[in-house]
Image (cartoon, rainbow, N blue to C red):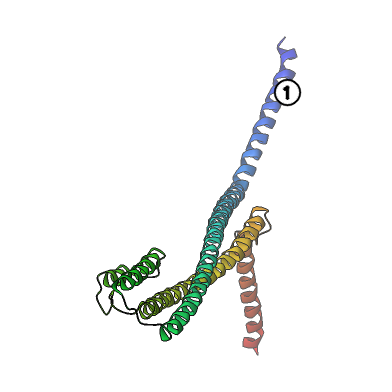
């Protein structure tokens, strides 16, 4: 039995020795490849971190561009509403100014007619005629005040018979004076309306210019957002880490240069 087991023991010992040699070889290879594996692992981790940083920066850039585009779009819509409102205000002021001019022209014509009538008027003889004429003047002044053609101070002076107003004066002369006062009031109203119309036109022009500028900026911002969102923006080139082989090649070149220099110096020294 011992003779039969001896070959089996020899085979087992040989298998153990072979497994030990293989394990030693694997361990030696692992020890030799460990720096290279560590270098590759570090390079892979660096590339992954750089990729994450690029993705984060790109996401931030896309969010900023889209937020700016939204803000500019909102500002452009508000500018459009403001421009429309300013334009409407200008047109309304323009219509009011034209109406004030027409009212002034009518008042000027009425003042000229009243002045001509006062030139050819006849003197009043009785007190009843004076009272009737005064009532007509007061009624005309009250109507002008209600239409906004006289101020309350002017109406008070006329009714109170102050400042050269009175029942004993010529009716047509007082009517001519009343028409002149109305004309001056309407002329002042026209001048005020003209200034307001000019200011409204300037405001409308400025609002329209702001609308055009914001519309152009909104279109450009929307285009930038579309380009960045589609991934067609300029990409940052990936910087690869320097390899140790470059350093090794540089040291090898330096040593080769030194060797060549020594070889050349040797014959020169002999000479």
> Is residue 236 visible in this depiction of the protein?
no
User: Residue 131: percent from the left, percent from the top?
Assistant: 31, 70
Whether residue 184 is situated above or below residue 43 in the rendered picture = below
Whether residue 197 is situated above or below residue 118 in the rendered picture = above
Identify which residue is drawn at 28% across, 70% down: 153
In terms of depth relative to the viewer, which is nearer, 120 or 212? Answer: 120
Identify which residue is drawn at 44% across, 80% down: 114
Whether residue 248 is situated above or below residue 118 in the rendered picture = above
> Is residue 109 visible in this depiction of the protein?
yes
* Quarter that holds the N terminus: top right
Q: Is residue 44 left or right of residue 125?
A: right
User: Residue 97: percent from the left, percent from the top?
Assistant: 50, 72
| Most distant residue in the bottom direction | 271
Q: Which residue is mark 1?
A: 11
Secondary structure under badge 1?
A: helix
User: Residue 25: percent from the left, percent from the top?
Assistant: 66, 39
Count of numbered badges drawn on the protein: 1
The image quadrant that residue 254 belongs to is bottom right
Give the class, few, some or many, for how many residues have Cα within 10 Å of label 1's Cα (few <14, many ≥20).
few
User: Residue 182: percent from the left, percent from the top?
Assistant: 40, 75
């Amino acid at each position: 039995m011992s003779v039969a087991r001896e070959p089996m023991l020899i085979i087992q010992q040989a298998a153990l020795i072979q497994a030990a040699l293989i394990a030693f070889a694997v361990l030696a290879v692992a020890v030799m490849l460990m720096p290279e594996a560590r270098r590759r692992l570090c390079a892979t981790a660096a590339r992954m971190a750089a990729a994450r940083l690029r993705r984060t920066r790109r996401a931030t850039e896309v969010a900023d561009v889209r937020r700016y585009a939204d803000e500019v779009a909102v500002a452009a819509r508000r500018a459009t509403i403001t421009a429309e409102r300013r334009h409407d205000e200008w047109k309304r002021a323009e219509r009011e100014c034209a109406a004030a001019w027409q009212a002034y022209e009518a008042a000027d014509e009425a003042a000229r007619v009243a002045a001509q009538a006062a030139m050819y008027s006849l003197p009043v003889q009785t007190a009843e005629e004076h009272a009737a004429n005064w009532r007509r003047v007061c009624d005309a002044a009250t109507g002008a005040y209600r239409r906004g053609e006289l101020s309350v101070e002017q109406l008070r002076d006329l009714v109170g018979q102050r400042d050269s107003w009175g029942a004993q004066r010529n009716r047509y002369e007082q009517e001519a004076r009343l028409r002149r006062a109305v004309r001056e009031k309407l002329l002042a109203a026209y001048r005020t309306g003209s200034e307001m119309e000019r200011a409204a036109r300037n405001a409308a022009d400025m609002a329209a210019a702001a609308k055009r500028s914001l519309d152009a900026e909104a279109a450009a911002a929307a285009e930038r957002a579309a380009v960045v969102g589609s991934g067609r923006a300029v990409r940052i080139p990936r910087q690869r880490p320097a390899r140790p082989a470059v350093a090794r090649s540089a040291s090898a070149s330096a040593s080769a240069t030194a060797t060549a220099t020594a070889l050349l110096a040797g014959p020169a020294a002999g000479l």
